[in-house]
């Protein structure tokens, strides 16, 4: 079964840091680009970051550029998101999401497999 | 960033009705447009990709059309299990962006 399981979400103070992880199983992880998509409480979907299949290229949404860093470990079938200088507006459910197309550019995305999300709350 | 708009923002329809949602891109995105369904408390689910391709396992009452700046998502006969919020998403530009969503109620 194809599965994505996120972890690492918690309450953190403004200005703090947090690292999210995503464990993938059931597919050839190193063939697919991966993404983080977030959803604030009662809000819509926002693409946060994406990384291509081999980790060579990555992109970020404007609201997180310079603060968040995406990475992947294909040997461990895992995806990570390092989040620094967190703000209240980063409070959201963070989804780990696979790109449907193998070996596509990080921005050429059809989001076909979603995890259940991990909640990040930025509050003092 | 390519701004996406959807209309209506919400709608109420009866079981068996034909439901149509429109999505507009600020600039042309070719057919690089996907549709997702999100039920309350659940992760989104891919329904339509590349404007009109039905994802495997998705019922045929769902369909998509359009190209360029104007797209349409249709449920041919609304079912109770279709109660959800529907989002369009473009990937012609970097970053990929979502529409604000359309909430469908019965």
Image: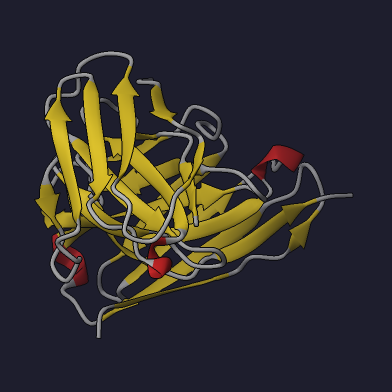
Q: Specify whether residue B86 is in view.
A: yes
Q: Name the residue furthest bottom.
A: A1
Q: Residue at x 26, y 25 (%)?
A: B93
Query: Which of these two is toward me, B70 or A45?
Result: B70
Q: Above or below — where is B88 with respect to B39?
A: above
Image location (x, y in percent) of residue B95: 34, 30
The furthest residue to the top: B27
Closer-to-camera residue (A109/A51) = A109
In the rendered view, how is the structure colored? secondary structure
Which residue is more in the foreground, A98 or B47?
Answer: B47
Figure check: B24 above or below A22: above
Quarter residue B71 falls in: top left
Residue at x 65%, y 43% (from the top left corner): A90
Residue B77, above or below A77: above
Residue A107 visible somewhere in the drawing = no
Residue B24: image location, x then y, percent = 31, 23
Q: Position of residue A118 (x, y in %)?
A: 57, 66
At 12% from the left and 31% from the top, the residue drawn is: B31
**Would you identify the image quadrant in which residue B43 lies?**
bottom left
Which residue is found at the position 23% from the left and 22% from the top? B70
Total marks in image:
0
Residue A63: x and y, percent? 55, 30
Q: Is residue B22 left or right of residue A32?
A: right
Horizontal side, residue A109 vs residue A6: left or right: left
Quarter of the image that includes the N terminus of chain B: top left
Asked if residue B4 lies left or right of residue A56, the reply is: right
Q: Is residue B14 above or below residue B51?
A: below
């Amino acid at each position: 079964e194809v599965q994505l399981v996120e972890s690492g979400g918690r309450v953190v103070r403004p200005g703090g840091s947090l690292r999210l992880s995503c464990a993938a199983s059931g597919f050839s992880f190193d063939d697919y680009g991966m993404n983080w998509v977030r959803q604030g409480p009662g809000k819509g979907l926002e693409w946060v970051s994406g990384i291509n299949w081999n980790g060579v290229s990555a992109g970020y949404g404007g609201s997180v550029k310079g603060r968040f860093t995406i990475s992947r470990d294909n040997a461990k079938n895992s995806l990570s998101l390092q989040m620094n200088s967190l703000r209240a507006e980063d409070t959201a459910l963070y989804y780990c999401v696979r790109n449907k197309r193998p070996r596509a550019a990080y921005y050429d995305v059809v989001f076909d497999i979603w995890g259940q999300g991990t909640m990040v709350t930025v509050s003092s | 960033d390519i701004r996406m708009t959807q209309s209506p923002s919400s709608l109420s329809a009866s079981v068996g009705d034909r439901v149509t949602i429109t999505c507009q891109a600020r600039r042309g995105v070719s057919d690089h447009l996907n549709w997702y369904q999100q039920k309350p408390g659940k992760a989104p689910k891919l329904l339509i990709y590349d404007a009109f391709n039905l994802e495997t396992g998705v019922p045929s009452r769902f369909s998509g059309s359009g190209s360029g700046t104007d797209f349409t998502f249709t449920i041919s006969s609304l079912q109770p299990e279709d109660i959800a919020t529907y989002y369009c998403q473009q990937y012609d530009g970097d970053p990929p962006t979502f529409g604000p969503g359309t909430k469908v109620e019965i």
